[in-house]
Amino acid sequence: MRRSPGPMDRDLALPRYGLLYRLFGVAAAVWITVVLVLGFLGPVPNLPILEQSARNLYFHVPMWFVLYAGAIAGAWHAGRYLATGRTVHDVRSEAAWMVSTVAGVTALVTGVLWSRFTWYQGTGLWWSPEPRQNMVAVQLLISGAYFVLRGSLDRPRQRARLSAVYALFATATMPFLTYVLPRRMASLHPGAEGNPAFSQMDLAGDMRWVFYSAAVGFLMLGWWLYTQRVRAKVAELRAEALAPEAAPVSVVVSSS
Amino acid sequence: MLQTADTTIALYDEAAAQASSEQPAQGLERIMLADDKLPVVLGVVLIVWIGVLTLLFRTDRRLARVERQLDERSA
């Protein structure tokens, strides 16, 4: 792609985002549009308590999938950064954490709204004692501290190294706080008390395929947003490397 | 569908005063008024989604342009 592969190029090497990438964007756009139509108009069993809000399954649960996928990608690139020291892995790790954390906040807030008018109808209870909700709030504080840590460090290599280590720790708490502990406690949320979250019994046949499609669609959207952030950050760093006099002083001082 | 139109509507909007739920819905109305007007919400959500998609595609195009310029300058 680049004609003069210097050390900077290898440090920030990205794949070419060409025709295939554009086709992927079109596919994700069409895919989610179809999911939206099916999600609104497709049949749901209309059970008591849930009623039509069962359609939230298509939009609330895929946010969890994006949260996990982003955290796994973030931890992977944190590990790759520590192994190789290549800046591109730090950029990828941060972008994946950002997408993951935004999806996590969306998942938490949509869950609060959904449960307020179903399980806690008539109680006026916005913040419920639901264990998963509370554990996820703790996890999001841990995830959010990643960005506080990044913001507090000026030297790029130190920032990249420390936040990579922190990202690995923050990912290590995720399965326990969002998976193991909520299953050990009594809760109305699917997946409590040792039950699998998506058993044959829990999901009506009509809804199953829309739900799977929604999960795939939002994972595609998450990857799209992630690559956009990576490309923008890499372009920024390449521009700084081309014109160091225009870069912030801290960047120039620390490039020893 | 729940209430007949309020007569004060005529003071504000002559067109809305003509609204009627008496005759059977036809054409587009038959689609949009089904399921307690849920398709209207779908329409709004799709319009918002198209707006978000426009921004996503425009960001893609802008990134491609910046990457091309950087490739030319660093070549």
Image: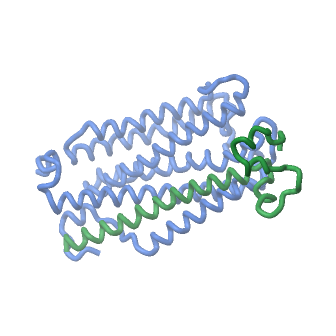
Chain colours: A blue, B green
Given residues A110 and B7, the one toward you in this image is B7
> Please, is residue A87 above or below residue A162 in the view?
below
Residue B72: x, y in percent?
23, 74
For the question of whether residue B16 can be seen, the reply is yes
Residue occupying the point 67% across, 46% down: A57
> Please, is residue B75 above or below residue A230 in the view?
below
Residue A31: x, y in percent?
60, 63
* Outermost residue, front side: B11
Residue A235: x, y in percent?
28, 61
Numbered marks: total: 0
Given residues A31 and B12, the one toward you in this image is B12
Residue occupying the point 66% across, 31% down: A116
For the question of whether residue A212 can be seen, the reply is no
Residue A219: x, y in percent?
54, 56
Q: Quadrant of residue A192?
A: top right
What is the quadrant of the C terminus of chain B in the image?
bottom left
Q: Is residue A197 left or right of residue A168?
A: right
Q: Is residue A25 left or right of residue B36?
A: left
Q: Is residue A159 left or right of residue A181?
A: left
Residue occupying the point 30% across, 67% down: B67
What is the quadrant of the N terminus of chain B in the image?
top right
